Every structure is written in C-alpha cells, then in structure tokens.
Image: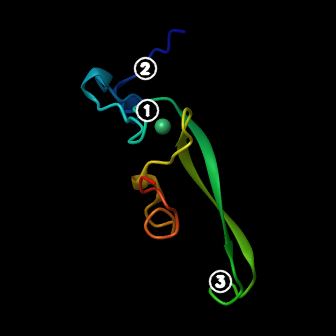
C-alpha cells in the first residue's frame, strides 16, 4: 500500500517513530511480550454515578497472553491492582 502524503499539511497522520528505540512492554510475571486486549467492566452504582443511574463503564486493558496477568500500570485508576487484586507472589 502506497499512501502518499498529499502535502506538508498531513503531518499529523504520520508519526515517524523508530520502534527499535521504543521499549517493548513485557509481562512482569513471565516475560512474555504478547498481550491480549481485554476489557474491565466497572459497574457504577447509582450512588456514585454523576447521572444518578446505574451504569457499566468499560475500560480497555491488555492482559498477558501467556499468564493472563495485567501490568499494574494499566490498572491504575481502575481500582484494581492496587489493593483489590492479589498480584503478589503467592
Ligand atoms: Zn505473563
């Protein structure tokens, strides 16, 4: 596929990144680097919902395709990973 940029205006669509210089995220548990997209569903109770109605909020995260663990960084702000999920070595 040859996508020719029409001019200097289209800069924003093309980001020249040398991926060799980018860090590959690896599973902190098993070292695997292939991740599966998953969705965490948060149920918002009517009490805390801004609309006053119960709702489900999907949050997209990635889990390790090998061991299924989710990098802790991705769980930040979801209420998971910090206290709720036991990711400590058992
Ligand atoms: Zn893993």
Q: Is residue 26 left or right of residue 3?
A: left
78 vs 52, left or right, is left
Read off the residue under disc 2.
5
Q: Quadrant of the N terminus?
A: top right
Quadrant housing residue 88: bottom left
Q: CB of mark 2 within 8 Å of CB of mark 3?
A: no
Instruction: Return the residue found at the far front.
Output: 90
> Of helix, strand and loop, which one carries label 2?
loop
Residue receiving disc 1: 13
**Total numbered labels:** 3
Q: Is mark 3 within 8 Å of ligand 1?
A: no
Q: What residue appears at the point 41 percent right and 30 percent down from the top-left corner? A: 10
Kindly identify the residue that appears in the image at 65 percent across and 83 percent down: 49
Q: CA distance from mark 1 to mark 2?
A: 9 Å
Instruction: Evaluate if marks 1 and 2 touch, with contact meaning CB atoms under 8 Å apart.
Output: yes
Residue drawn at (46%, 70%) of the image: 83
Whether 50 is drawn above or below 6: the answer is below
Sequence-wise first label, 2 or 3: 2
Q: Is residue 4 above or below residue 10?
A: above
**Of label 1 and label 2, which has the lower sequence position?**
2
Task: Label 1, secondary structure: give it.
Answer: helix
Question: Which numbered mark, 1 or 2, is in the foreground of this view?
Answer: 1
């Amino acid at each position: 596929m040859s996508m020719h940029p029409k001019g200097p205006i289209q800069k924003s669509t093309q980001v020249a990144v040398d991926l060799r210089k980018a860090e590959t995220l690896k599973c902190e548990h098993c070292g695997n680097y292939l991740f599966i997209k998953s969705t965490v569903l948060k149920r918002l109770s009517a009490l805390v919902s801004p609309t006053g109605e119960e709702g489900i909020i999907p949050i997209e995260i990635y889990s390790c395709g090998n061991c299924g663990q989710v990098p802790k960084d991705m769980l930040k702000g979801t209420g998971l990973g910090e206290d709720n999920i036991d990711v400590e070595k058992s």
